[in-house]
Amino acid sequence: MSATIHRIGRGAEPSLEPMIALVAADMNLVNAVILDRMQSQIPLIPELAGHLIAGGGKRMRPMLTLASARLLDYSGARHHKLAASVEFIHTATLLHDDVVDGSDMRRGKRTANLIWGNPASVLVGDFLFSRSFELMVEDGSVKVLKILSNASAVIAEGEVNQLTAARRIDLAEERYLDIIGAKTAALFAAACRIAAVVAERPEAEEAALDAYGRNLGIAFQLVDDAIDYVSDAGTMGKDAGDDFREGKMTLPVILAYARGSDDDRAFWKEAVLGRRNGDDDFTHAQGLVRSSRAVDDTLARARHYGQRAIDALGIFPASAAKDAMIEAVEFAVARAY
């Protein structure tokens, strides 16, 4: 593999383990809330929801809520339900995304829509969205409700923006960044920010955690989009080349198209329109994104946003929580390599 990601910081290979250990006790309580609130008298709902919720995800977003609360020395319990709310929002969007994209693999398993069908996946996604709002209301903070409800709306806008940008070979990098800022980074930002609200910390600390989450989310998505062209299904937990076959204009394609020869551009136009999406075509696309350094430069941008996330934590004093949150950024940028 020609593209490598170097650790933003220093030393050994970064890991999520420090963050996992930091929030382990809190995460047990969050998982209890998730398990309780995904129940229903309609058996299909917990069956389908549990397929994805228990499907091996890292729980990155709720962990960020919990870690941010630890960073602020918050000693209450409100963040447990709110972290569960964040995970329900994320899970609902995944269920809907897999229907929209026609995906058949998620986290190394068959997708819910492939097993139970699109209607059931959409409706259970709606159920989980509703549960997330119940948890927000139970918290009682209008500010928390505003942050998370706004994030939910922004995510939906980002998904629609991506849908309308699909198979658009002329997509600009700026619009691409708008899309991932909405569909991925908005929930990362909100997950971190609500910890400062429940801890009753100053606006500057709210803004810092928002910036941390937002930049981490952008870096996270940039890496996802890069490894679609350089990784495999075992590493990614989804089929390699899914973005390519769906005609998604991600940054590696935007850069490779801009830098390509006339023949290269002709290939990308056909591929994005769905006329060149076989296995051999994907292999050719992988060669183009490598030879044009599109993957390398996508990962360079990920490192840039990762560093911005780390810099946002500069206002907080040294602590185990801060170290874990910094290493989580480094892990997000270096994962799968």
Image (spheres, rainbow, N blue to C red):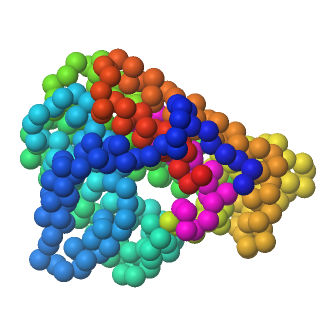
The magenta stretch spans residue 223: yes
Q: Is residue 39 left or right of residue 148?
A: left
Q: Position of residue 288 (x, y in %)?
A: 80, 54
Q: Is residue 270 visible?
A: no
* Image x and y of residue 20, in percent: 31, 48
Residue 167 is a magenta residue:
no
Quarter location, residue 325: top left
- Residue 41 left/right relative to 95: left
In the image, farthest residue toward the front:
12
Residue at the spot x=27%, y=71% of the render?
50
On the picture, is 116 further left or further right than 13? left
SS assignment for the magenta stretch, majority? helix
Q: Please, is residue 72 above or below residue 257 in the view?
A: above
Q: Is residue 213 above or below residue 160?
A: above
Q: Is residue 236 above or below residue 159?
A: below
Residue beneath the point at 18% across and 49% down: 25
**Tag count:** 0
Q: Would residue 83 be seen by someone viewing this image from the given angle? A: yes
Task: Say which of 236 and 138 sits in front.
Answer: 236
Residue at the spot x=15%, y=57% of the render? 33
Query: Over which residues does the magenta segment extend?
Result: 213-236
Rendering coords of residue 267 (x, y %)? 82, 60
Q: Quadrant of the N terminus?
A: bottom right
Point out residue 106 in the picture as x, y percentages from the top left corner.
46, 68
State the image quarter where residue 312 is shown: top left
Q: Who's the residue at 71% across and 60% down the image?
A: 272
